[in-house]
Image: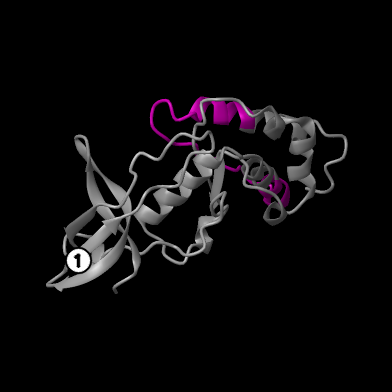
Amino acid sequence: MEGAKVYVRQNCGTSQGWQKAKVIAVLGTGRYRVCLEPWEQASSGTPALNEGGEIVEVEASSADGGNLPFQNAGMPQNGFPDMITLDHLHEAALLHNLRVRFFAGACPYTYTADIVIAINPYRWFPELYSDEMRKEYLVFDRKKLAPHVYATSSAAYCGLQETGRDQTVLVSGESGAGKTETVKILMGHLALIASSDDSSHI
């Protein structure tokens, strides 16, 4: 266990959050001495919130399963586009991957199998919503393209065409998460598909 890359619970103001750490000693009875590690830098050059290096003792028995959750090895610079590829699938790993993808600034979308997770970037990405991009998600297999909400609208329309039955797209999230904008994007894409002169590829 010594040398293992893990996550530990740390107080963040009035709540608790996850922090990257490295186990430096096993103290027994579920206790570990760890060295806190900094988060990755934001793409804008903003320094990480925690510079790391602090040595703390943590109690693993309060964690799920009584063990410290492991970090995923080989985190890509832009994070994992589909989180079902994570070796260790737990809350801390999911949040870490979403954090990396958010600060990479390339795409606000991440897949978890057929689910599309969107994190509100609080800015517009015009290149993600061009007519060319809309058409790509009609023609190409979603596995060959970056995660996008257009994959959901294409799948819904495809299901409608194949089964002749109504389809449902569920958009959920907290206030301010971007649900309304996401629905607008989905509906705009569905309108484009439905008005296409040639939808034989669906």
The residue positioned 57% from the left and 37% from the top of the image is: 105
Q: Classify residue 134 by image quadrant.
A: top right
Q: Which residue is mark 1?
A: 32
Looking at the image, which is closer to me, 147 or 157? 147
Residue 144 sits above or below residue 172 on the image? below
Residue 104 position, x and y percent, is 55, 42
Residue 186 sits above or below residue 50 on the image? above
Residue 157 position, x and y percent, is 69, 43
Outermost residue to the right: 197
Residue 77 position, x and y percent, is 56, 51
The residue positioned 44% from the left and 30% from the top of the image is: 177
The residue positioned 79% from the left and 39% from the top of the image is: 135
Looking at the image, which is closer to me, 75 or 169? 75
Residue 7 position, x and y percent, is 31, 57
- Bounds of the magenta segment: 158-185
Q: Classify residue 30 by image quadrant.
A: bottom left
Describe the element under mark 1 as helix, strand or loop: strand
Residue 111 sits above or below residue 71 on the image? above
Going by the image, does 9 lie left or right of 160?
Answer: left
Outermost residue to the front: 53
Going by the image, does 100 lie left or right of 30?
Answer: right
Residue 181 forms part of the magenta stretch: yes
Outermost residue to the left: 29
The amino acid marked with disc number 1 is Tyr
Q: From this viewpoint, is residue 113 visible?
A: no
Going by the image, does 104 lie left or right of 146?
Answer: left
